[in-house]
């Protein structure tokens, strides 16, 4: 009986070890593919969720795959803390283990990232001095030209996803104490601008933007993501 128990334990350990080896190989291949396609300096961290892995692999279906990229750049825009979550993924195990990810398909890819305020400010008109999150939205301080006259003030702006990227639009303004009144309508002509971040990796397009303490927290979503379609 003792010998049988030892054998069962050994077999169980072997299955667990084999399971972990297989998942690491699959994760490495997905990370390698993304790093190559997007010319990343480092291979992203990939975590295929769920245990055991082999039961998912045999079925070729994975509920969740998390990809942590970190820093990523496109069109002179650099984002930080880029994470991508793939949901309801289909991928034959033989392809993953043989360095083939072209048949990998995800029903949904949700990407989140932070666009630092210094990056946003780089696309703003001259005169913008600082940006910060506030209870009423994103606040922009600076000196703005009103009919050729420089006027200091604080502006509350909205940030929204548009076809060309992230559009920043003034909605209210507070002039400096004792200074002249600033017209919001006139300010929109000079302070409305776009940050050219149209999408994140895997074709995910921006769906929501929220000002945070460290920058704009963006979310992007793509559906029916096929690795064979990547550049």
Image: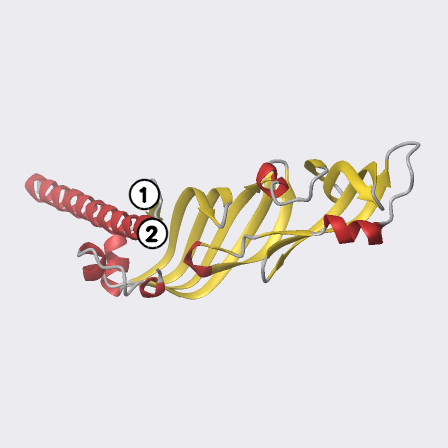
Outermost residue toward the top in this view: 177
Q: Nearer the viewer, residue 110 or 131?
A: 131
Badges 2 and 1: C-beta atoms under 8 Å apart?
Answer: yes
Outermost residue toward the bottom in this view: 224
Location of the N terminus by quadrant is: top left
Q: Position of residue 115 (x, y in %)?
A: 56, 43
Q: Position of residue 72 (x, y in %)?
A: 44, 44
At x 58% / y 45%, what residue is drawn? 217
Sort mark 2 into few (<14), some (14-19) or many (20+) by Cα contacts within 10 Å.
Answer: many
Above or below — where is 115 with respect to 161? above
Q: How is the image coloured?
A: secondary structure
Sort mark 1 into few (<14), some (14-19) or many (20+) by Cα contacts within 10 Å.
Answer: some
Outermost residue toward the left in this view: 3
Residue 43: mark in rendering: 1
- Of helix, strand and loop, which one carries label 2? helix
Which quadrant would residue 101 be assigned to in this image?
Answer: bottom left
Residue 149: mark in rendering: none
- Which badge, 2 or 1, comes first in the chain's sequence? 2
- Of helix, strand and loop, which one carries label 1? loop
Residue designated by label 2:
34
Q: Does 85 sit left or right of 102 as displayed?
A: right
């Amino acid at each position: 009986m003792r010998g049988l128990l030892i054998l069962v334990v050994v077999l169980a350990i072997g299955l667990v070890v084999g399971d972990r080896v297989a998942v690491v190989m699959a994760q490495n291949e997905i990370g390698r593919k993304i790093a190559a396609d997007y010319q990343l300096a480092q291979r992203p961290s990939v975590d295929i969720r769920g245990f055991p892995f082999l039961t998912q692999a045999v079925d070729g279906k994975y509920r969740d795959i998390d990809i942590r990229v970190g820093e990523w750049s496109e069109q002179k825009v650099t984002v930080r803390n880029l994470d991508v979550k793939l949901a309801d993924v289909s991928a034959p195990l033989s392809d993953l283990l043989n360095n083939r990810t072209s048949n990998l398909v995800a029903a949904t890819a949700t990407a989140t990232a932070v666009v630092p305020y210094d990056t946003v400010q780089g696309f703003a008109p001259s005169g913008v001095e600082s940006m910060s999150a506030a209870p009423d939205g994103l606040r922009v301080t600076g000196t703005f030209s009103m009919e050729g006259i420089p006027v200091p003030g604080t502006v509350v702006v909205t940030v929204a996803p548009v076809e060309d990227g992230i559009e920043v639009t003034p909605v209210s303004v507070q002039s400096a104490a004792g200074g002249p009144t600033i017209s919001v309508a006139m300010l929109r002509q000079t302070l409305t601008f776009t940050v050219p971040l149209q999408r994140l990796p895997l074709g995910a397009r921006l769906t929501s933007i929220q000002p945070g303490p460290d920058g704009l927290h963006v979310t992007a979503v793509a559906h029916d993501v096929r690795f064979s379609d990547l550049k």
